[in-house]
Image (tube, grey):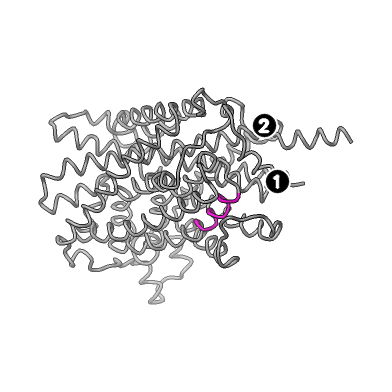
Amino acid sequence: MLFKKSIPKLIAEANENGEHTLKRTLTSGGLIALGVGAIIGAGLFSLTGIAAAENAGPAVILSFIIAAVGCAFAGLCYAEFASMIPVAGSAYTYSYATMGEFVAWIIGWDLVLEYALAGATVAVSWSQYFNQLLMIFHIHLPDALLKGPWEGGMVNLPAIIIVCLLSLLLMRGTQESSRVNNILVILKVGVVLIFIALGWSFINPANHDPFIPVNAGEEMVKNGQQSLWTFLKSDDFGHFGFSGVLRAAGVVFFAFIGFDAVSTAAQEAKNPKKGMPIGIIGSLVICTLLYVLFSYVMTGIENYTMFKGDAKPVATAFAKTGYHFLNTALIITIIAGYTSVILVMLLGQSRVFYSMSKDGLLPKIFSDLSKRQTPWKTNAIFMVFVSIFAGFVPVSDLGHMVSIGTLFAFTLVCVGILVLRKTDPNLERPFKTPLVPFVPIMGILVCVLMMASLPIESWERLAIWLALGLLIYFVYGKKHSVIRKQHRDQQGIE
């Protein structure tokens, strides 16, 4: 049988209060800031340049639009769940209610990959910009302390330090973390607007020509010189042309993961039924508009080929404007923006593990709360875990792993809406996903298409991660599941 958590039980959990529950402190504005804080970061300031140089060229603008469409479909599904089931845990909790414990475990374990590695990815880029700032003040760190062993160094020390500092901040409390995030978001959005406004007049139309660089393999398919199947398996796939636009969409999809991080904080929202849809959809709309304008300006100021291997493409492009007096302010604010992303990712991860631990699928240590009502032990454990990845793994590998994990989570949320509309059509839904089944089906198709465009290595790493998760589930989670224990007790009584 499917072991599912009932919606009434989840709602009852959401209404609990006291020192053993998460504290409700977040307003609708705070939730939007949380989303924007997570969305605008490495995906925009770093991965945009990588995706343009390696995959789409100036057409990375189209990649952002494709990714945004997929996010819009998934976001509408998230908004319905978040308003209806305002409990910490995001897609993990929604899957538990619709598709049962086994699928919930898979998605919860997948979310750990998403949030933890997203935090590590951004920490790597944060380190690069931080080093750039130090160089302005004539402070030079040795390369061995700025790169992991796979990049010719020893360890990315600044990346480790920022993960540790923000983990300690989260241990202090959600409200304190939210205040810091709000300040960082204001600074970050300000930088994006300044970059767009000042950079617009420096756009060179020649840098947008060709808008979609030619893919030799695609041309051979068009001319009948190569079969489509051969092209799909070749190294040419994903390197420019339309296939490059699709692959870049899968890569920059990482830039949109913030809105689902909002849903992990549902149990800490003051008015989740109203605030969650506003936070999810509002942050997505704001950031999509900024992304399209930003990527258009960046690829117009500097030729996309110059961004190859550059972890700080914004600074590279902005240097072409001649506004050298703003360079330091730009770098400081980008660092502040990255900081807010890492903060929200670490918060989201800890809330997923908190929910899984409350359900008995993970040891109780992960749901232990401090006097400030934060899962501080989870924060401490993942402070170590994320630091290791940030300190030793290259940013491009991390980005691909996060993207495929995120797309997988979004796909299951869209499936969940279809299931719940069929099994429980009369449930109260403060926000209803429009045009069902069209919206969730399109969300599934777009997300699966972007997953298919990612490198095979991403799939292999996802498979290894999920295999490890299944091992833990069958060894520990299944035996200690609260809902399974309740079922066994009921059978014993009968």
In magenta, the rendered stretch is: 75-84
Position of residue 415 measured from the top left corner of the image (x, y, whole percent)? 61, 57
Within 10 angstroms of label 2, few (less than 14), some, or many (20 or more) residues?
A: few
Q: Is residue 28 above or below residue 176?
A: below
Q: Is residue 154 left or right of residue 425?
A: left
Residue farthest to the right, as pictured = 494
Magenta: predominant secondary structure element? helix
Q: Quadrant of residue 105?
A: top right
Residue farthest to the top, as pictured = 371
Question: Which secondary structure, mark 1?
Answer: loop
Seen at 57% across and 53% down, the residue is: 413
| Disc 1 versus disc 2: nearer the observer | 1
Q: Is residue 263 on the magenta stretch? A: no
Q: Is residue 127 above or below residue 411?
A: above
Q: Quadrant of residue 326?
A: top left
Viewer-side residue, 328 vs 8: 8
**Amino acid type at image mark 2:** Val
Quadrant (top left, top right, bottom left, bottom right) of the C terminus: top right
Q: Residue 6: which numbered mark, if any?
A: 1
Q: Which residue is label 2 attached to?
A: 475
**Amino acid type at image mark 1:** Ser
Q: Residue 452: which numbered mark, if any?
A: none
